[in-house]
Image (cartoon, coloured by chain):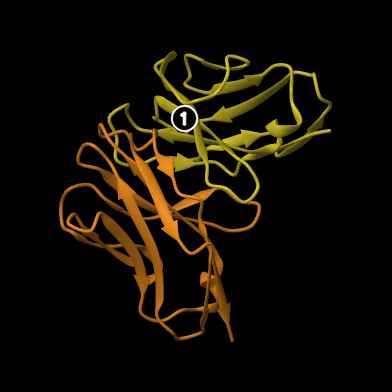
Chain colours: A yellow, B orange
Amino acid sequence: ETGVTQSPTHLIKTRGQQVTLRCSSQSGHNTVSWYQQALGQGPQFIFQYYREEENGRGNFPPRFSGLQFPNYSSELNVNALELDDSALYLCASSLERRNTEAFFGQGTRLTVV
Amino acid sequence: AQSVTQLGSHVSVSEGALVLLRCNYSSSVPPYLFWYVQYPNQGLQLLLKYTSAATLVKGINGFEAEFKKSETSFHLTKPSAHMSDAAEYFCAVSYNTNAGKSTFGDGTTLTVKP
């Protein structure tokens, strides 16, 4: 059974550009959550997808958007990148929307210059 | 609204000493509570969770935590620290039985001295 995998592991983007981060959920998991973890802080909830539909969103602007595909993998898209978007982006998958455990990937380190 | 406060951003203990990491939460509904560990440049690993069953929860690597509703606390302890315990620890709270929608504290960095 494979765990949660994220790609790429690191990337550098220029302010104003757009970026797409990818996440493959753990086998059999239909719920994917995305978090932003700025340096020295705890993860902050961006949004969650359940069976290809958004199932809740945190306090992030609309330029943060996502998708979930029929195989339950997911993408996080960020438009018009700002310097403050530099962070570790974490993906977590769960077996169901109602769940007592989320499994995290290793994260994607995004640096905006 | 739910929130988590981790008291002490840095905790230092000697190898073999007691580890105590503090977490207080606020939640308008019965919470689910979690402790995660994060090693440098890695994701989060679940140490233990409270989901309204036993108030004393045992986790991996010898860690345990006690849910105290009257104190709104969920402190993490380990009787004897090991060098490999050095890491960042996060307390998190969620509700509506959805661990994927959690609110995290700012973390506590644990240093273990030889």
- Closer to the camera in the image, A38 or B72: B72
Q: How many marks?
A: 1
Q: Is residue B63 something that shows in the picture?
A: no
Residue at image coords 54%, 30%: A24
Q: Is residue A87 above or below residue A79?
A: below
* Left or right relative to A2: residue A107: right
Q: Report which quarter residue A96 is drawn in.
A: top left
Name the residue: 48% across, 19% down.
A71
Image coordinates for residue B47, horizontal then vertical, percent: 39, 58
A30 versus B59 height, above or below: above
- B58 versus A6 height, above or below: below
Chain letter belonging to callout 1? A
Q: Nearer the viewer, residue B113 or A107?
A: B113
Say what secondary structure mark 1 lies in.
strand
Query: Vertical placement of A27 versus B107: above or below?
Result: above
Q: Position of residue B15 (x, y in %)?
A: 51, 84
Residue at (74% x, 23% y) in the render: A81
A29 and B108: which is toward the camera: B108
Position of residue A88 in the picture relative to residue B1 (left or right): right
Residue A12 % position (x, y): 81, 33
Name the spot of residue A63 as percent of width and height, x first. Answer: 63, 15
For the N terminus of chain B, the image quarter is: top left
Q: Is residue B1 visible?
A: yes
Kind of residue at badge 1: Ser
Please identify the quadrant where the C terminus of chain B is shown: bottom right
Query: In the figure, is residue B9 to the left or right of A8?
Result: left
Task: Please rate how many residues cluster around mark 1, counting C-alpha atoms within 10 Å: few if below 14, some from 14 to 19, many from 20.
Answer: many
Q: Residue sitting at 49 percent across and 42 percent down? A: A104
Residue A102 in which image quadrant: top left
Q: Which residue is mark 1?
A: A33
